[in-house]
Image (tube, helix red, strand yellow):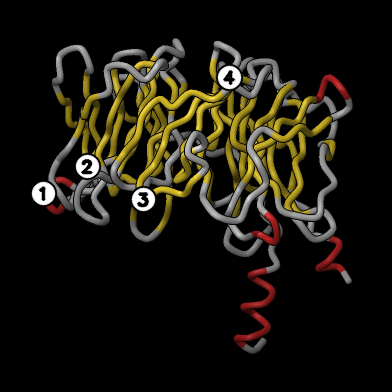
Amino acid sequence: MDLNTLARDWAALPQLTNIHASGDGRWAFFCSTGDEVEEVWAVPTDGSSPPVQLTWSTDHLAIRDVSQDGMLLVLAQSHNASEHDHLMTLDRRVGNKLRLLTPKQDSHYVYGGRLTRDGGVIFVADYDFEAEAVIEGACVWWQSLATGERRLLARTKNFFDRAPSLSPNGERVLLNVNERAPGGTQVWVMNLDGSGLREVLNFGLHNNTRGDWVDDDRIAFVTDKGGKDRVGIVSLDTGAVEWLGGEPDILPFEVLPGGGGFALEAHRESRSNALLWDGAFRELPNASGRRSLLPRAALPDGWLCEAYDADGPHELVAVTTSGCLRLTRAAPSRMHAL
């Protein structure tokens, strides 16, 4: 087989993206290719029925958040994959009805779309809706799902492309911002009403620090402090940092909250692996039969994971105290089958 054919076959391998779980753990959601674009699918996490396609669209869709019961989703879409997204809700209670949240546009960027407990959604845009103008930095917006009212919560000098993250109790917002040198990121926290904005982690102008919640007080983070990638936890109450590990033993990449602690995606010997932390690190058990198993969303008693090899279709599995249950395998798109 020549290299061009090999590259084409590899690029056509079916994959799953945008994996999410409902807060109650009963539903898994993902994007996978329908006819030509990424569509939204749902599957129960107990494996009781096969996946159901929820959307039929002419442009790619991405999942930004899912409600506690899995009946309401926040989606993002842009025309012709331009990355100038608008936000929508998908309501499974009324026939998967789609409703526009932010205007369709081709001038600015929108990241996030997290549901808040007060009936809203929070997102970042390099757009000032009050002035109706694109801006240099970023605005953090809260928008009512019921009325469409928007409130400006915070504004930063530079734009950042990571979604705001809500604390487990829904009262505080974590921002991974870029307010200093290019490529360097810092962690900020504020209250949901926009008050109390402050910098929590900053390890230098050029250091890349990104994190997410462990609980209402603690944030797990990955940073390249001192030229080495490290993982740690910071307490908002005391400001104390607990270092958990790093190079050369592990090469931490990303943290994902859940499971009474967090999951850490790390690299070792050119391979990705997952470690679970609940006071100490342990390997995520892999009974999937695939070489790679990475957590993508937390379940009440485990993790929703992507299982895959480099040369085969990706699978969605639920790893819980009951074992490893395969929920679906990505199917080749009908476009590739032609």
Q: Looking at the image, is mark 3 or mark 4 nearer the viewer?
A: 3
Q: Which quadrant holds residue 297? A: top right
Which residue in the structure is indicated by mark 1?
226
What is the C-alpha distance between the residues marked 3 and 4?
A: 25 Å
Does the CB distance between marks 3 and 4 fall below 8 Å?
A: no
- Whether label 1 touches label 2, CB < 8 Å: yes
Q: Label 3, on which residue?
A: 136
Question: What's the distance in space between the residues labelled 2 and 3, CA to CA?
Answer: 31 Å
Residue identified by numbered label 4: 120
Q: Residue 121, relative to residue 272: is it above or below? A: above
Q: In this view, does 128 lie above or below 70?
A: below
The residue beneath circle 2 is: 230
- Residue for point 75% across, 41% down: 40
Do the residues bearing badges 2 and 4 touch, measured as CB atoms within 8 Å?
no
Could you say which is closer to the camera, residue 78 or residue 241? 78
Task: Find residue 136 and report its horizontal and vertical position in percent.
Answer: 36, 50
Q: Which numbered disc flags the more N-terminal residue, 1 or 3?
A: 3
Q: Distance between the residues labelled 1 and 4?
A: 40 Å
